Image (cartoon, rainbow, N blue to C red):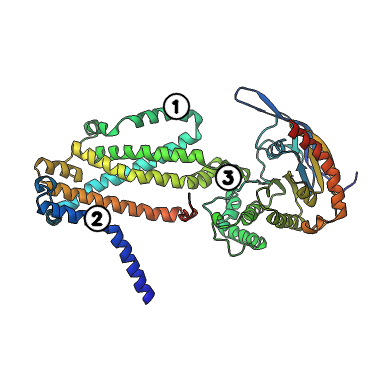
Amino acid sequence: MIKALNLIFTNAKELGIRLSGFIILILFWETAVRIGWLNPFYTSQPTGIYSDLIDFYESGLLWRHTSVTLKATLWGLFFGSVSGIIVAFILGFSQTLAKVFEPLITGLYGIPKLALAPIFVLWFGLGIESKIIMSGLLVFFLVFFSTYGGIQDVDRNIVRSIRLMGATPFQIKYKVYLPATAPWILAGIKGGLGASLIGAIVGEYMGASAGLGWMISYSTSFFQVERVMSCIFILFLIGIIFNGILKIFERVLLRWRAPADFDQPL
Amino acid sequence: MDYPHQNMPVFQVSELHHSFYSKKKEETKVLNGIDFQVFENEFVAIVGPSGCGKSTILNLMSGLIKPTKGSIRLRDREISSVHSSIGYIAQSDTLLPWRTVRRNVEVGLEIRGVEKEKRREIAMELIKKAELEGFEDAYPHQLSGGMRKRVDIIKVLAVEPEIIFMDEPFASLDVFTREILQKYVLKIWSENQRTIVFITHDLTEAITLADRIFILSQRPAKLKSTHHIDLKRPRDPEELKFNPRFLQLYEGIWKDLKSEVEMQVKK
């Protein structure tokens, strides 16, 4: 009983520490507006954002726009990750293809891809497709480079020992390379989470009829800063939730790794 | 010469030459005409100064690389590719870090398409025999070096290879762990006779384990001499060190090896 109480207390304390920065920021913001340091016309204020969020929710618009953005983000993340992994594996095992395509991919990576957003809207329309493609493209590069690096890093001794056991080339990829690159793939996807949101939002800025990105640009043009802040708050929550989900994946998929030893001096 | 294994040669290595080529096509001769035979159920050790090409011989014999010149016959066929009747235990750790001990032991069986129940049964039996019971669900990083090596060995034993190659398997372990594992290898070998080719630079280890020892010269390596170890079996690695016959053999072989090592140092 005491143990349980202790645990709740420790968890509450932990949560408190994690939230304290956030709470301080909000209190400071509200106070600064009230005593006239900040002009709410430009910065809005927490209480105003709160009441706007309630309006936003009750009108049913919140979920409508959030779901559009989420859909573009998740599909972008999915297609970007899958294509990144597949292309990395193809180039990782074919020297010829790697010679042809690796410089090409590296070159394309150098282009600021957000600059392509208007042309994607022109090519793929105002619908969700152009956003998925924008978002997927950003994710692709991150997952590709991470996975490709991981393939180069696989322990050749392990590969040799599995080959000596008579494994086919496919078995070697499936039983050695794929699990060995899992940490790299997950690291790529972790970076891709943020990138996929950026891709979807920027795509919506350029031309759309719904979505949080569209809502932000629409509200800004009418100086509805509260609504802009509401949307940003929702994006912030989405980011946290995505990261939380990925952490669970990491814990399950990478449980074989030795835990990092924080007690050891570096 | 007579020794108990003079029956069919399992391996017939003749006139084996091998060279490595750098990017600029410069040749480095590693093996310079090596001939030997390994017989059925024989325990052979190959000893030589470091860098003389001991591992290259095993890589050639296992079909991982092709010789520049010469032939290696397994039974009556030329080795042309990786052969499934050979088990290979390397110096480095080759356990899959994302698999538990049991799933590591199962990996070879998985590759061969043995069904799940059967795999589990075989793996658990080997784990028990290797005194690793209770660790079947542990991950490699949770084990000590000696335990990992034992898993590495039973992983190879699981597919029941007729021939086992060991390339300095215990080089990275401490002396005590090494002795325990030598005992373990001797036990495995006596329980279920197999042909073993064991590479080491440790002469004590070679004498303790082997029926015959091949001494290689420094690079480009030739077979310098062959020694028959007539110590009685079963052998106990701990007691053997004080056995007069052991010391006698050691002295004789060491003289042979010493000149090669010294030459290498002078170079």
Q: Residue at x 83, y 47 (%)?
A: B250
- Tag in front: 1 or 3: 3
Q: Position of residue A22 (x, y in %)?
A: 24, 55
Q: Position of residue A165 (x, y in %)?
A: 62, 46
Q: Please determine if labels 1 and 3 lie on a single subunit.
A: yes
Earlier along the polypeptide chain: callout 3 or callout 2?
Answer: 2
For the residue pair B153 and B76, the one nearer the viewer reads as B153
Q: How many marks?
A: 3
- Where does label 2 land, which residue? A22
Kind of element beneath mark 2: helix
Distance between the alpha carbons at the discs numbered 1 and 2: 49 Å
- Where does label 3 land, which residue? A158
- Where does label 1 land, which residue? A100
Q: Residues within 10 Å of mark 2 (few under 14, many from 20)?
A: few
Q: Residue at x 76, y 50 (%)?
A: B205
Q: In the image, A70: left or right of B24?
A: left
> In the rendered structure, the residue with mark 2 lies on which chain?
A
Q: Amino acid at mark 1?
A: Val
Distance between the alpha carbons at the discs numbered 1 and 3: 28 Å
